[in-house]
Amino acid sequence: METLERYLAEHAFFQDIEPAYLKILVGCASNVKFQPGEFLFHCAEEANSFYLIRHGRISVELFAPNRGAVTIQTLGPGDLLGWSWLIPPYRWHYDAKALELTRAIALDGKCLRNKCESDHSLGYDLMKRVSYILNQRLEATSLQLLDVYGYGK
């Protein structure tokens, strides 16, 4: 039988997590599905979740005056979407849209913040995991900027 706990354990974001933490986190998790073109969230909205993408692709977009929506990143299976649930004032900084049928595990940010306040070890573990992703994405963005401005040639 498929369970949310198993999905969490199999996702790269939670690789090698303490089994006791999975039992806590599953209480904040739910299965979600998004149709092509459906928005997961919009910039400036309250950020109260993050997503572990299981199947499909998500476009992370930024609105640019005179250009409209600009895709800044495309995420797929195994990726994490969203960390604004963790950083006050808990607002999204981008839009996120499903490019194809997408299935994910949504983790409720308010629930997670409460669990982290109750168990600081869990909070520290999650912070390290999110920080690692943030660092990877910052490095990728730096390389993209070098490429865009021709410094990599």
Image (spheres, helix red, strand yellow):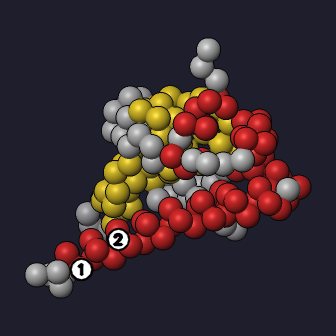
* Image location (x, y in percent) of residue 17: 66, 48
Mark 2 and mark 1 lie on one chain; the one further toward the N terminus is 2
Percent position (x, y) of residue 33?
50, 29
Left or right: residue 110 compared with residue 150 = right
Residue 141's disc is 2
Q: Horizontal placement of 47 versus 75: left or right?
A: right
Q: Amino acid at mark 1?
A: Leu
Q: What residue do we see at 55% from left, 44% from top?
A: 51
Circle 2 crowding by C-alpha within 10 Å: few under 14, some 14–19, many from 20: some
Secondary structure state at the residue bearing disc 2:
helix
Residue with the mark numbered 1: 146
Q: Is residue 39 visible?
A: no
Q: Residue furthest right?
A: 118
At x 57%, y 47%, the residue is 15
Comparing 42 with 30, the one in front is 30
- In the image, residue 111 lies at what x, y percent? 78, 46
Would you place residue 72 above or below residue 32 in this image?
Answer: below
Quarter of the image holding residue 3? top right
**Residue 91 got which mark?**
none
Q: How many marks?
A: 2
**Residue at position x 38%, y 29% in the image:** 101
In the picture, the quarter occupied by the C terminus is bottom left
Point out the residue furthest to the top here.
1
Q: Quadrant of residue 107?
A: top right
Three-letter code for the amino acid on which mark 2 is drawn:
Thr
